[in-house]
Amino acid sequence: MRILIVDDEQPARERLRQLVDDFGVHEVVAEAANGGQAIAMASKHNPDVVLLDIRMPGVDGIETAHHLNSLDTPPAVVFTTAYDEYAIDAFEARAIGYVLKPVRRERLENALQHAARVTGQMLQQLTAESNLKSTRQHVCARVHGELRLIPVSNIYFCNADQKYVTVYHKDGIDLIDDSLKSLEEEFAETFVRIHRSVLVAIAHIGRLEKTSEGTTRVLLRNWQGKVDDDLIVSRRHLADVRRRLRRG
């Protein structure tokens, strides 16, 4: 199998590489020191398996696994972890591969033999049943065949058009694979729905304004782009938008 090793500590990467090399049947195609590098390396090398550390600064292992699922051919994931017994029980209940640190040869060999692809639902269940962070800090866009991470904090609003969702953020405009419904559920504290096809980041709402037609629209802070009528608040959602703004 083609293997990508991901760990923010170089000695840990070297240990894993040595173990994999000792097996004599697998190939380490790349190494990465963080989640962002892991996603780039996975897009480039198309590994069969990713040995993925969980505790990493920035994009942690759980979020990285979510984004790896966006690849055309998602790799199998084996988490390397020093988490406590409660989290390990959740891994086992979800049939998700893991190897406890310090990594032992026998355990790694067994995990590679049983490596399986991790679905988004499995990851959500895992985080719900353990002490792991459950909300992503980024969404993932496909740009020229590669995956681009967009910080959630940089998103102004999301607009759904048929099966596509367009994300308007500080660095541009991108299409993502997430549905508007799933974004609303995952980031319930961050976004508010203003009508059936638009979510707006509460932190970026400057104020509400009445239009000459008698409707209400959202005005964004520091927004330089053109939104046309995308940010008109429907009557159905107006009361909730006002409530969320008062609370936020």
Image (cartoon, rainbow, N blue to C red):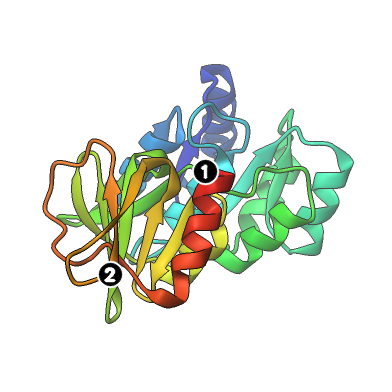
Outermost right residue: 85
Seen at 70% across and 43% down, the residue is 132
Q: Image check: 71 left or right of 248?
A: left
Q: Is residue 75 visible?
A: no
Residue 70 appears at what percent x and percent y? 39, 61
Q: Which residue is mark 2?
A: 215
Please report whichever mark, 1 or 2, sits nearer to the chain's N-terminal start: 1
**Nearer to me, 44 or 184:** 184
**Nearer to me, 225 or 24:** 225
Residue 54's disc is none
Q: Image check: 245 left or right of 149?
A: right
Q: Residues within 10 Å of mark 1 (few under 14, many from 20)?
A: few
Residue 142 appears at what percent x and percent y? 25, 57
Q: From mark 1 to mark 2, how far is it between C-alphas?
A: 68 Å
Q: Is residue 209 visible?
A: yes
Seen at 61% across and 53% down, the residue is 112
Residue 24's disc is 1
Asked which secondary structure carries label 1, the reply is: loop
Mark in front: 1 vs 2:
2
Q: Image check: 173 left or right of 6?
A: left
Residue 110 appears at what percent x and percent y? 71, 53
Asked if residue 194 is positioned above or below residue 169 in the image, the reply reads below
Outermost bottom residue: 162
> Which amino acid is tagged 2?
Thr
Asked which secondary structure carries label 2, the reply is: loop
